[in-house]
Amino acid sequence: MGNSYAGQLRTTRFEEVLHNSIEASLRSNTVVPRPVFSQLYLEPEQRPLSRDGHMENEEEEDEDGSESNSPPVPYQMKPPPEGSCTTDGFCQAGKDLRLASIATECLDVPPGFLLVGAKSPSIPDHILVCAVDRRFLPDERGRNALLGFLGNCMGCGEKSFRYFTEFSNHINLKLTTQPKKQKHLKYRLLRNAQGVLVKGPPICWKGIDSRVRQTTSNMSGGLEEHPPNPGASDLLASSGAMGLNTVSYTDLNTHLQASETSPHMINGSHVPAPQQALPQTGLAAHGPGRPTVTASMANSGPPKKRHKGWSPESSAPTEAVNRPTSSSTSNGTRSADSVASGFVSQGSSPPLPPGESVTVPDGLLQTCGLQPVIFKGHGTLPRLCGSTGDVLVSGRLQACYCSTQTLPRVYEQYGASSVQPLSTEMQVLLTVYYLVQLAPDQMPLMEDLEQILMRSWRESHLSEIRQYQQSHPQFPTPLPGLAQPLTPSQLPWLAKLATSSSGESVLVLDMAPSLAAALDGTFQKLMEGKLSQTHYVVIICMGRSQETESCIVVTGKHQSRALAESMLSPSDCMSEISQELSCRMTAELEAYFNSLGLDGDVEALPEKASPETSSASTQGSMQEQSGEPTCAEYRVEWREIRPIQLAVARKLLSHVCAIADSSTHNLDLGSFDKVEFLICVPPSEVAFQQVVLHLWNSGVLQELGLDQDCLSPKDAEQYVVKLDQAAVTKISGLIQKSKLNPYTLFILVHDHAHWDISSEQYSRVGGEPHSGLVDSLLNCRQIQEAANILTLHVTSFPFVLQTQFTRISPYNEIHWPSAFNNDVDLYQDKTKYFGVSELLDSTRSGNGLPLLRFDSSFESMVAALEERFPRLHSVVIRTQVLLQHYSVALMATAKGQAQLQKHTSVETLEMVQCLLGSAHRCPNHHGHMLLLRIPFPALAALAHQRLCRVRDRLGLHERFEVVLGDPASGIVVGKHFLNQLRVWLKIQDPEWTPHTYLELEALPCILIFTGMNPMGESLPRSLKYCDQRVMSCCALQRTALEQELGLAAYLVSAEPQSQLGARISSDLSESDPDKLSGTDNEEEELVVDVNTTLLGQAHSRTDSSPHKQLQPVLSGDPPHGQRRSSKSSSPGSLSTQAHASPLRPFCSWARNLNRPPVVLLPKALYDLITTIDASGLPKPTSFLPHASVEWVSSFRPLLSKMMTCTEQSLYYRQWTVPRPNHMDSSNRAEGRTDNFHPRRLLLSGPPQAGKTGAYLQFLGILSRMLIRLMEVDIYDEEDINCNSQSDLVLYHQAIASWPNADTMRGIPFDFTIHDPKYEDISTIYSPDFTPDGEKNARRQEDVFLRRRTARIKLSKYAAYNTYHHCEQCHQYMGFNPRYQLYESTLHAFTFSHLLLGEEIQLYFIIPKSKEHHFSFSQPGGQLESMRLPLTSDWNPDCIKSPIFTPTTGRHEHGLFNLYHAMDGACHLHILVIKEYEMAVYKKYWPNHIMLVLPTVFNGAGIGAAHFLIKELSYHNLELERNRRVEHGSRPQDVWPFIILADDSCVMWNSVEVDSKSGIAGAERNVSLKQVLQHMESSADITQYGLCGLRKWSSRGSGTGRRREPFSRGHLHDFLLLNVDLTHDIQYNQNRFTCDDVDFNLRIQSAGLLMCRFNNFSVMKKQIAIGGYRTFIIKTKQMTDVPTTVQPSQYICAPDSKHLFLATPAQLLLEKYLQHTSQRLFPLSAGNYSHPVLSVDCYLNLGPEVTVCFVSSRPHSINISTAGLHFGGLLLYFCDSFVTPGFLKKFQFLKGATLCVICPNRSALRQTVVRLELEEEWRFRLSDEFQTANAKEDHPLFFLTGKHI
């Protein structure tokens, strides 16, 4: 900014603007990129040349290095705003900017900005502090600085100064010349060891100036070396006056016509020939993916700061500079030879014949110090010979090219169209652009290049793609504005033009006739050292087929090393490192460390340090024994189960239930009665013991009933297996157990499921040890086909299992609740997960020190050593440097010598000081863990040996432990620390040793964690630092990177704000205020937490009363990112810290429990992870998920930031396929789109989140659910209204099996109702019964809801609902896949009945398999009857009585599956349903016979169903008798019984009676078959009208005493009904409630025998859905608002305006009487001695009123009513048997109430007249009522009166 040009293109300007344009074009999301060359030309005014040929007013150099003789132009500063400060050293806001004043202050530096020092001419002794965007500053070599400026004022904080002129005015530089950043920004500012801001190295503006001068000299040198072509010279001379002023600016959207005779070039600039017009050559692009350059270089461009009146079309004359040039022609393109601008002549190396091989020179690696990597591009790479081991060849680039040239299938169907793939030339050009914009330390990534190529393709075909997406029937015509493709002749020139801004880092070779010749020349230049500054050589040539051929040679030392190491497989890498260690190739490196000097000699220093340190250690141990206070803050939290884990376990359970509930019947949960499991883990001893520990502490073994064999954690190991060769036996045993125990559900848990996904076939050919084992064991045919084995894969990185050929259905995936969509908040968890995304957020928050860091000094040392030792693997070098740093840091900390710090880094020193200091502060020596991640075991062993040796020499062997974490072995801890752990964990076992890292909680230690991949090991909460600086950047897959970062995952307690503030304050007390800064991050300034700084200052001022001073500071709650203050102690602070602090000792470990660990990464990996791609996600998320999978196509979208886990799964399922070595590669289904295994689940969740605890809880709740599936809620209620005499043995012997008819006649009928469900109905009067006066009545609805139940396990003889699917009853249910869905036929059955007044037509739905139970007029003809057996028939496998089950609303929950209850016996079961439910019942029960009630009964109650069943059965009995008579049988021989069963009868029991004593024993469950056959085989069974069973109760079996085996009384729920004897007694078809009580009383009054088998009981399941109780009383008006109708509104006066109800009239009447009879019959309310007389019916009048039932039928048996005065009379639908004389037999109290109920008003009046009621009863007009029904709904009428 502030530069002046005069119509001439400056090289510096050209390079930087082109570099900026390329980068902006590649990154921009706009369709049309920014014009390139509009930035390269300046004011059109002509300016005179100076004497030396330079333009006047050219850019000034620095004052000490300017080569311009032009005088400076006077500059007048803009006057400051009124009232602004103009003092030197202060900004216009009056804030001090001088370094001397603000060096110690905490400055807020935004990410990406650097602190620099500016010099003001008015105060030369001071430096002004500024913050400048690093993009506008040069690097160490003076390169890559973008033009322009962006800065912030560090005084007042004002931001975003876009012009240096404006910024210089704000900071009061008071310049007299044009402000330039190159002149006035002088130094970088850094912080020293004390945190003070000091002047750093000068900013390398010289690099740019020297590059300008070098370019100029190279141009002139080139002219001398290569004499110009005479023709060219003449051409330039003739065009000098007018050649550069006739070309106008060309818009980027205009496609450029390429000419075969391209114009001549002068250092990359076209000069047009005078014989022809200047052709416009270049490349047109429609987006940032296709950067555009133009060939019209010499035009009059815009002014430097564009004026409003200027337009790109305007032109002004400029004067050309006559400069001769030399050129050579190749493929029609002329090029000058200029090394500085990236062009290399091929004249020095003779071309090789086509097809010839290329010889790699001997000693190439030794001479150059690097191993070049050749990327195959287009064409065939020539064969290499010679020292081929010094060169690597990679096909990654070629694969990238091929992938991006394969169009998606969606375009193939349209044939040739305008949608074409990228051309070869465009791919090469974009590759060059990509290489140019790479940083010097940045490795090229094929993922980035692929996205660049795809973005270019998409944006160049944006219009066509949109038209295809709109599904136009014909392909779109090419748009007229589309650019023509790039031609081969344009490619070299444009490629060189692109590299001109990169200096020498990218070189384009285009003059060779073939790739072989170009490669040979490249090798020669490498040997000669001419490519020392070149990172990439791009070779472009025209092949024999006239097609472009290309390849890229990587010649940069850093780049070639990184690429070479990334090409090694993990096993090859491990072998190479082991070979380097075994062959002592590291000896030279170790010698180099020893040569650093005495103060850096690791072996010499400890010997001097040992005596002092050991004495200090002895003193410390003596102090510990002197009675210091013990630490009471130690607690272990990893054994607790969190709410979110329970929620995930329930989600797992719901998915298992979904599999069971699906129509495929792949899992029959109802058939399992037990759960067993086996957990498979990777072959890591720590991971194995960790799962065993969690299993032992979870209580799952006790819950599953497996604890009998597990008395110690050692015994629990039988349920966990490591996936090594020993697992074969365990898995085989599981398969055998599954076959022997078909009713046991086996759960096979595959933990860390992404670990081994190799196919068994591939591992046989040459895989690694143990690879392919998972495939051979878990994917074997036996496990896949076993119906009782469920496989659960558990992993933190499920991407490798989510491919197109996956075995896991997307519906069977369970994802951990995500904080992204606030799922976690639903579970009220007390912890917050801190994982990879939170680590990345800490680098961007700016609120404090980031938790993710890199070590710049470590990286610098590694880079230097990598150049010095090219043959050593970088991981070996990194390990040696790391060990050197730790060794020196240990010495510096223990010795307290500041001079040692120059041999280590700030980060290493901080970690070592924290490690040693934390344990020193705590009375119990609790400390922190430092994780040292070294993936390679050989290097880890070396590190363990080295650190132990240094620790022991320093006498620190009791201060901290060094633990080697090797997957192949257990944990070894020294005796001293072992004793400490036993005390902390309160373990008494003297033989105990820690088996998991979790048990190392609070142990101060360095854990050297090795193994190529973590295997699911969890780390303790004492982990404070995670040092991953040795981690290799080779494996750039998402899984590999995320699992390494997952080691630092942490659970942060969600504490109240007050506690959090207290924790922060107490944590600060462990750090001195002058500690070192926590990180150095090279050129990035750290943002220090303001709150933390204030707290630290307050603490440093605290003396005798620290808490009072800290209290006001702690009133605010710091943000989440400020929780960790990462500081390092100053040298020597450890020895004085305990004495300097006046505070009491505290536990540093306890104070840091709520702080995630700090992670140190390699710089390259840090840059990679913190880079955000176009989707807003970190770049690694777009990497290939795993090495064993590959992308389906390059034409895939990026992952979106808003994607959920489910959407990510679908993304990978669509866009990835397994490679041949993947175990799912063979899982391809012929003719199917998927081949999912039905019993396979996938649980995915972030690392360290608690997945093990979740699936262990799942095992427990699954077992409980199976038990619950086998248990049902059974009504468990004692009989009501019992007296002590009821159970005495008075009539039958206690051991009697069947009743005696004569004896039964002598037993009096028990009128009292004992069924608890009728607790709140009217008591039936009986002279022998005295009611309980303390009875507390409740409403019947409440009784139904509050009835007592018991959980009872289903026996093998239970009845089931539709959710039961076992193989035995599949055919019974009609779901056996071997059978077609059972066909059913609809048959009409008509009969007439006197009470109904018309013929009734019923419909039978009869499956084909059940037609043998019926007789037809002919096969398939008219239904005649239902077949009935003879009384004399006997079949042990057959039940004679047809079973009728009336049901409504319970098509799913009704217990109609009687297969197990009948023990397989043949039986006839008929469901009686309503017409509107016919379809749904038929769907769920296709193999059941159904009796469909007529339409008129859709709104009827249970009485109608019972009535029709009984009358139909009697009619059928008559038909069967006629049919049997025709076959010679007697009518009385036909079996007359049917069974009326409730749809909730679930099990039947029998009481065992001792044959000698007659004492009742235990009650056992028996089959319904046994119960019915026993009852049917009773002697004289046909003499009984009704038989039934006792209602089960846990206290009603009479165990331990003698009881009457048979009794006469009311029967309910399960009845054996004799339809022959009871043919004159009907159920009341109008009744909704108590119809069975009413029927029982009328059977008794008819003198028929009733018998209850007391040794049998029926269990009734509580079913809250459906049934005949579910009638809702609602208004007739249709309204969405629910209304409550009071019982008083159930009736109304006739002919009145009343709110009518849409409820049957009978139900309204029954409900009204139930709730209001105490007011209707006041004399009987609560008065048992004056009941209400009810004639021929029983109606529930509520619990307060007693009813006396009498029958008006002749010869009926009624109770004696002599002397009984009734309080009321109830006449319900009186028939002719009720006469005035009959009523006069009874006596009523004066004022007794009469209630006459009739179906209509006319019948009501006729009844009053016929019965002469007005003689004794007084009526009023207001005493007539009707139910609140409309006329069309046929209301019931009733009349009330009073007795005179």
Image (tube, helix red, strand yellow):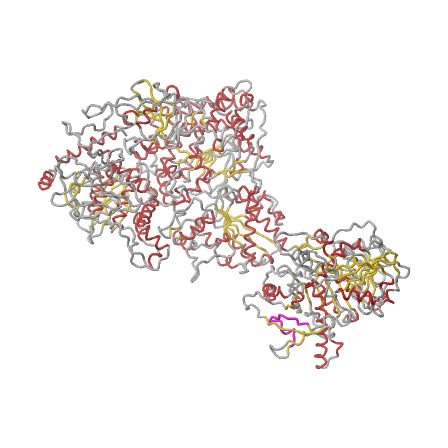
Which residue is nearer to you in this view: 1146 or 1766? 1766
Question: Is residue 1463 left or right of 44 when viewed as pictured?
Answer: right
The question of residue 1407 being in magenta is answered with: yes
Question: Most extreme residue toward the right, as rendered?
Answer: 1763
The question of residue 1157 being in magenta is answered with: no
Q: Where is residue 1159 in the image (x, y as percent from the top left)?
A: 44, 35
Q: What stretch is highlighted in magenta?
A: 1400-1415
On the rendered image, what quadrant is the C terminus found in? bottom right
Q: In this view, does 1258 lie above or below 1797?
A: above
Q: Position of residue 1425 (x, y in %)?
A: 67, 75
Residue at point 75% right, 51% down? 1338
Question: Is residue 191 left or right of 205 when viewed as pictured?
Answer: right
On the rendered image, what quadrant is the N terminus found in? top left
Q: Quadrant of residue 1280?
A: bottom right
Q: Quadrant of residue 468?
A: bottom left
Question: Is residue 1124 left or right of 226 when viewed as pictured?
Answer: right
Q: Position of residue 1219 (x, y in %)?
A: 39, 53
* Camera sees residue 97: yes
Most common SS among magenta residues: strand
Q: In which quarter of the image is residue 143?
A: top left
* Camera sees residue 1557: no
Q: Position of residue 167 (x, y in %)?
A: 33, 26
Q: Is residue 556 above or below residue 727?
A: above
Q: In this view, does 968 lie above or below 1444?
A: above
Which residue is nearer to you in this view: 298 or 629? 298
How many discs mark residues in the rendered view? Answer: 0
